[in-house]
Image (cartoon, rainbow, N blue to C red):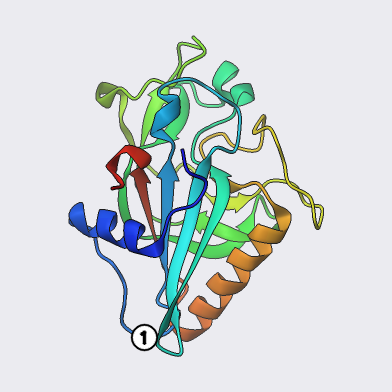
Amino acid sequence: MKTCYTREQIESTVKSKGYKWFENGDYNVNIVGVRNSDTGTRITNRFDDCLTISYKEDGEWKFHCFECTTDPGDDWMDKPMNSKGCAILVPGQYRGSHKLRLHQGRYLALGQQKNVKVYRDRDQDGEYDFDESTIDEGLFGINIHRATKYAGKTSTYVDKWSAGCQVIASNDDWHTFLDICQTARDKWSNNFTYTLIESKDIA
C-alpha cells in the first residue's frame, strides 16, 4: 500500500461512500484512517496503515498522512482482553465518536465517546477475521493515540500498542496531529468524527 495519498483521493473516497466531508471554515477537520487492503487478513504487526487529516487554514486546504495501525497487534490477538475476542474496528464513519481526553489517564489523545462497531476475533489463528456475524457495537475504548513516547522516535512493531485502537507510529507525527486537533477543538468543539476506509476503495 502507498504510505501516503493525496487529499483529493481521500475526499473523493469518503464522498463516494456517502459519508460527510467537512469543508466549511478553518480547522473543521476530516480524520480518515486507511486500512491496508494489500495485506488481506494477515497479521503483520506493523504500522502499515495510514491516518490522514484534512482541514482548511485561512481558506486553503492542508493535508497530512501519517503511518499508523488500524488493527490490533499480535500480542492482543494472541491474548484477547475481552472474552468475545479482540476488537477490530469496522470500516465506516463514526460521527462525533471521539473527544480530546487522557488516554489511560496518562496523556492527551482522542478517546472514544460514542458507540463504534468492531469485529470480534477470538480464534487466535494468526489472521484477522472480518466476520460480520461477530460485529459488536458499543464503547470499547477504541482510542486514537501514539505509540512511542520518545521525541524523534518511531515504533516499528505494533505489539501491545493496539488492542483495537488507531495508533500513530511516530512521536513527532503524533504531536503534529494532536496540535491540529487542539486547534480544531478550540475553534469548534471537543467532538471529532472518525472515518475508516480501506485502501482498495481509493482510486
Secondary structure under the numbered disc 1 in the rendered image: loop
Q: Relative to 101, is 148 above or below?
A: above
Residue located 59% across and 63% down the image: 101
All told, the count of numbered labels is 1
Residue 71: percent from the left, percent from the top?
A: 50, 34
Q: Within 10 Å of the Cα at label 1, are there few (<14), some (14-19), or many (20+) other Cα atoms? A: some
Q: Toward the viewer: 76 or 63?
A: 63
Q: Relative to 76, is 151 above or below?
A: below
Question: Could you say which quadrant of the image residue 122 lies in?
Answer: top left
Residue 6: percent from the left, percent from the top?
A: 41, 59
Residue 66 visible within the image: yes
Q: Toward the viewer: 128 or 14?
A: 14
Residue 171: percent from the left, percent from the top?
A: 72, 55
Q: Relative to 196, is 23 above or below?
A: below
In the image: residue 55, left or right of residue 161: left
> Looking at the picture, which amino acid does disc 1 mark?
Gly
Question: Could you say which quadrant of the image residue 158 lies in?
Answer: top right
Q: Toward the viewer: 166 or 176?
A: 176
Residue located 52% across and 83% down the image: 186
Question: Could you say which quadrant of the image residue 114 lies in?
Answer: bottom left
Q: Toward the viewer: 93 or 8?
A: 8
Residue located 43% across and 33% down the image: 88
Residue located 82% across and 53% down the image: 150
Q: Relative to 20, is 121 above or below?
A: above
Residue 89: percent from the left, percent from the top?
A: 40, 38
> Which residue bears the numbered disc 1?
25
Residue 106 visible within the image: no
